[in-house]
Amino acid sequence: MSSSWSPQRDVSPQTSRLMVERAHEEFVTGNADDRRLADVRQLVRESWRRSRDGAVAAEALPPVALTGSALEEYRQAHPLAGVRDMIRSLLLPGVAEEAGVVVAVGDAAGRLLWVEGDRQVRTRTGEMGFVAGADWSESAVGTSAPGTALTLGTGVQILGAEHFNRFVQPWSCTAAPVRDPETGLIVGVIDVTGGTEVITPQAQLLVDAAARAVEGELLITRMRARETTPRRAPAARPQRATLRVLGQERAHLDVDDGRELTRHTVSGRHAEILLLLSLHRQGLTAERLTELVYGPDAAVDTLRPEMVRLRKALARSAPFIGVESRPYRLTAELDTDAHRVLSLLDRGAHRVALASFAGDVLIDSVAPGVEEFRDMVRTTLRGALIAEASADVLLAYADTAAGEEDEEVLRLALELLPPRSPKRAGLVTRIERLEH
């Protein structure tokens, strides 16, 4: 382990881990007035309440907000991209793969951009979704050092059981926000995750100092650039849009126009057309698109007025996305949350993919092309989870609408559970109900 993270003195939390665990259990099960909560740090209690009020799940992996090329483009354009080497030298000196901790750098919204450090720790924390692209804001995973530090705007340390999410409770973490040196606005967060050695007072001083050093470097770099280059308008972020179609009666279009992120509700028919065009980026003839949307017996004239309305809707919500004719195709890349799930499965991130799977694709749609894609996503997810053959993952899938009546999945999970697992009785009951 790197000497930077060798314990210099033990942390002395106000309560034992067991007491905090019991207080947490009472809180998340609805007993918010339990007397043991008085022994939990006020900072943690208040964060737990924010997490509960925001309907954050106490047992769920964080959603993945950025993947693939979208993640890479965003990282390259982020202000902290140029100071990664500095952060690494300050917090991961020596052999980073044997440091005993992982260091994460996130943006102001809590999305992790880089996660580096000890190889084994990185693998284990990856199982709880601590990976690049994942959303670790307080509104997504509840109390954690990076998310709570961003919420409060100050350095934060969270000890094991103080985490709101039970999956994160084996770990401890220290984080500090990074601010723009001129505007004072938060641009990101630096986090160190590991054992109790990362929550000593010295650890907080080190992470805070790293954040201040980064802010100083940002200012120096900016001043040098002004001296050597003509004054010009800052480059805008890439424009992108994401169509959210999983588990929703009404689809939404999240639009980042380079200045701000906005969400727009999309009509059912427009969601179907946009989804199908995102699946066929080379384009579709009017006849083929009509068949996929309305069925094989529909006339092409049924589609044309809908395309006119779709173009007008896009002009209002996402003007950088156009729809060309002959064939019909989108002029800009459109991501979907369903494609992100498939991408995660391709990379073997099955648990994170399941956490990102909010439900079936456009659950009320009867468009033939949508029904085909819906079945493909469900089949791909199910096959990948069965192949992994992990009881916890299969049980989590069985709790979704797609898997709640899947007898094969339930039986496989039953086989994998330990003989004395308290979950076996409930599984047997569910299987017997399906048999009858």
Image: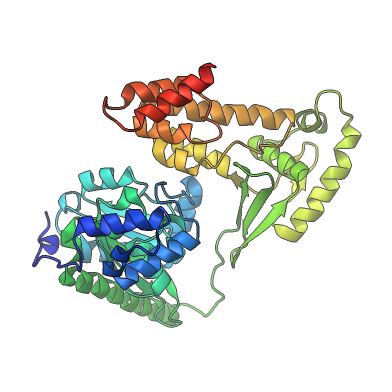
Q: Which quarter of the figure is the C terminus placed in?
A: top right
Q: Does the image show residue 304?
A: yes
For residue 425, side relative to residue 5 (left or right): right
Q: Residue 371's image quarter?
A: top right
- Residue that appears at 49% across and 43% down: 356
Position of the N terminus by quadrant = bottom left
19 to 401, vertically: above or below:
below
Q: Where is residue 105 in the image (x, y as percent from the top left)?
A: 35, 61
Horizontally, residue 105 falls left or right of residue 200, namely right
Residue drawn at 54 percent across, 68 percent down: 235
- The location of residue 72, given as percent across then percent down, is 45, 52
In the rendered image, the vertical position of residue 401 relative to residue 305, given as above or below:
above
**Who's the residue at 32% across and 24% down the image?**
416
Q: Which of 240 and 176 is in front in this view?
A: 176
Q: What's the image's color scheme?
A: rainbow
Answer yes or no: is residue 321 visible. Answer: no
Residue 290 versus residue 126 in the image, above or below: above
From the viewer's side, name the closer residue of 13 and 352.
13
Q: Position of residue 303 (x, y in %)?
A: 85, 37
Question: 49 or 383: which is nearer to us?
Answer: 49
201 displayed left or right of 269: left
Q: Is residue 357 above or below residue 23?
A: above
Q: How many labels does the image show?
A: 0
- On the image, the x and y values in percent for residue 260 come to 59, 66
